[in-house]
Amino acid sequence: MLETGHHYRDQVSKIISWGHWFSLANILLAILLASRYLFIAEWPETMLGQVYSLISLLGHFSFIIFILYLVVIFPISFLIPFPRTLRFLTVIFATVGLSLLIIDTEIFKLYNLHINPIIFEILLGESEQTLNSDWQSLFVFVPFLFLVELLISSFLWHRLRPLSRFKLGPIIAIFFFCCFLTGHLLHMWADAAVYRPITAQKANFPLAYPMTARTFLAKYGWLDKEAFNKRISDTRKQSDSRLDYPKKPLLINNDNQKLNVLLINISALRADMLNDSVMPEMSKLARKGLQFNNHFSTSNNDLLGNFGIMYGLAPQYWDDIETSAKPPFMLDYFVQAGYNLGIFNTEVLAKQKQTTFINLEGPKTTIVAGTKKDNETVQETRRWIKQQDKSTPWFAYVSLQSVQKMKTPNGFPALFYPNIQDLNSQAINRQIALFNSYRNSVSYIDKAVAKIVYELEQSKQYDNTVIIFTANHGNEFNDSEDQSWGYGSNYSTYQTQVPLFIVWPGKTPSVIEQDTNHTDLVPTILTNLAAVKNPISDYSNGIDLFSGHFKTWQLLGDKNNFVILQKDTITLFTYQSLFSRQGNHDVRNRNDYKSIPLTAMHETQFKQIFAELNYFYKAVPAQIQNEALKIKH
């Protein structure tokens, strides 16, 4: 090294030179430790995906450590020009950083997440601010790592002059920068090309935010939107989906019960509407079956509420189900078991045609959709039931929309006043008027569904038919007093709690007060029909509602949120914060949806929740698989 004779300048120059080499040594150490992510995550099947994994590993961690050096160590070099002190502080800083990296790889192995505040709540004991004993063993390597950093620091400091003769610095810097840039450019291309072997890796590394540019490319005409949408559609036909659903192929039990199944789904029907004043017919029918007084949808919207009913999966799986175009396990059973199928939907099926009801065209399937009027849907359902051959079991799915639209047919007598038609008066309370119109539409649906049940009785099929009555989500009329109306705006019980009763031939009527969820419907149907030899864990996140064993929490949500409903609380997490390593969450009172102080998430609950979120994906850690199996049993 060239010395100028100026002590301060020479010391700072020597420290900075040492810092460069020390940073390089830690880049290599970090890459070595971070290579564990590649073994934990699903290894890409394509050569390009594998190349991207290696390039992004080199580029990402070299960039992170260089930035840390630039932001922390480099400025301090001018403030503390004392070699021993600075080197000691830098060694501590590097030890802490690499220790966190090792801990993060373990967290990624267990939960498929990276470090965030929620994880630290788990690491801390439930009652004392001490580390959970299961995690304390992770810190035994810290003294060893500290010693290694000290040795590296000392070696580089005493070999600084001979090292300075090597002119490899610029070459190494250019190499890592090229890896960093190439990784982001590859991801930008993969995102536009919908190339999953690369885009599926975006959350493999902590603090990773790969570059995307769809909007920019489309804005300047470099991305054809129609071609892009076609590529998205084409990915559904590919076999490289990360989804592992079902876990095992369908195994039909030949000794199954030959019962008909009628599944009625009323869009936007609140749980508190099932009473003698608004729905006298359904209330009477419910008392003949098993009533679930605390039943919840899987979400607060149509798409994911319907998804939970038909698939028995947590709503967070929807995107992957849509991408892979996987039909529901339950409908696969009904098709392969030779059931006649009737699908009756007032609205156009839209996305459900490409997922839930895909590949159902055939002589044994009748699909009536897009009638626009519930009375026509009901008429078609009754006609179909009447035509059924008693020797062949059938499954019918009926979805009605009048409640969601708050409409009744012309001539149907309104029972509740004032309603929407009276809103021209300024004295009318809008909330009451809307709610009364809603109740009038519910009253109409009560009579409409009763006609379907009447058809079962008239055709002498009632005694051989399972009747399941529920809704895809609730509806709010500013009940939570935060200007929330309708559905899809929050996860209060007004928008998520729905009615459920099951009239099952031979089962004693009863009332169940425990919390239940839409994911439980599919396993309840298949288990009690003795339909398949597969265990529930092969095809659903739910439980058999007739088993007598219930969960202490329910998983709700959508693609951006997951929501944990418990006895007294509703806890909301956002994917954006959680999976970007922030992990903020909001806790609400279950009864009135008001915010309450944050409560720590217990480790057992956390493991069970993430078991459900990750169980039906490939390359799931063994601990998650085992935790999910514990939930089923």
Image (cartoon, grey):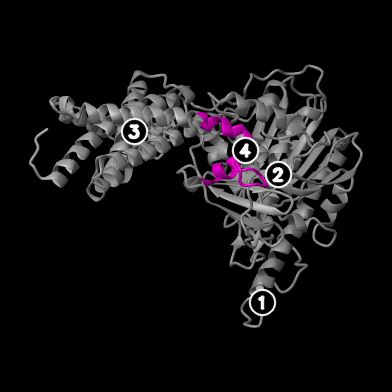
**Which x, y percent locates residue 291?**
83, 46
**Which x, y percent locates residue 16?**
21, 39
Residue at x-position 82% and y-position 33%: 547
Which element carries disc 1, helix, strand or loop?
loop
- Front residue of 508 and 591: 591
Name the amino acid type tagged 1.
Answer: Asn
Relative to 325, 418 lies left or right: right
Name the residue beneath numbered marker 1.
429
**Which x, y percent locates residue 591?**
72, 60
Name the residue beneath numbered marker 2.
553
Q: Which of marks 3 and 2 is nearer the N terminus?
A: 3
Determine whether label 2 and label 1 are within 8 Å by CB: no
Location of residue 71 with respect to 528 vertically, above or below: below
Q: Quadrant of the C terminus?
A: top right
Q: Which marked residue is nearer to the observer: mark 1 or mark 4?
A: 4
- How far apart marks 1 and 3 lie (CA) works out to 60 Å
Name the amino acid type tagged 2.
Answer: Trp
Residue at x-position 64% and y-position 57%: 588
Q: Mark 4, residues whose alpha carbon is within 10 Å: few (<14), some, or many (≥20)?
A: some
Note whether residue 436 is visible. yes
The region drawn magenta spans: 117-140
The image quarter containing residue 548 is: top right
Name the residue beneath numbered marker 4.
132
Name the residue beneath numbered marker 3.
61
Name the amino acid type tagged 4.
Answer: Asn
- Front residue of 502 and 372: 502
Q: Which marked residue is nearer to the observer: mark 1 or mark 3?
A: 3
Determine whether label 3 and label 2 are within 8 Å by CB: no
Name the amino acid type tagged 3.
Answer: Phe
Location of residue 310 with respect to 563 vertically, above or below: above
- How far apart marks 2 and 4 lie (CA) works out to 23 Å
Q: Which of marks 2 and 4 is nearer the N terminus?
A: 4
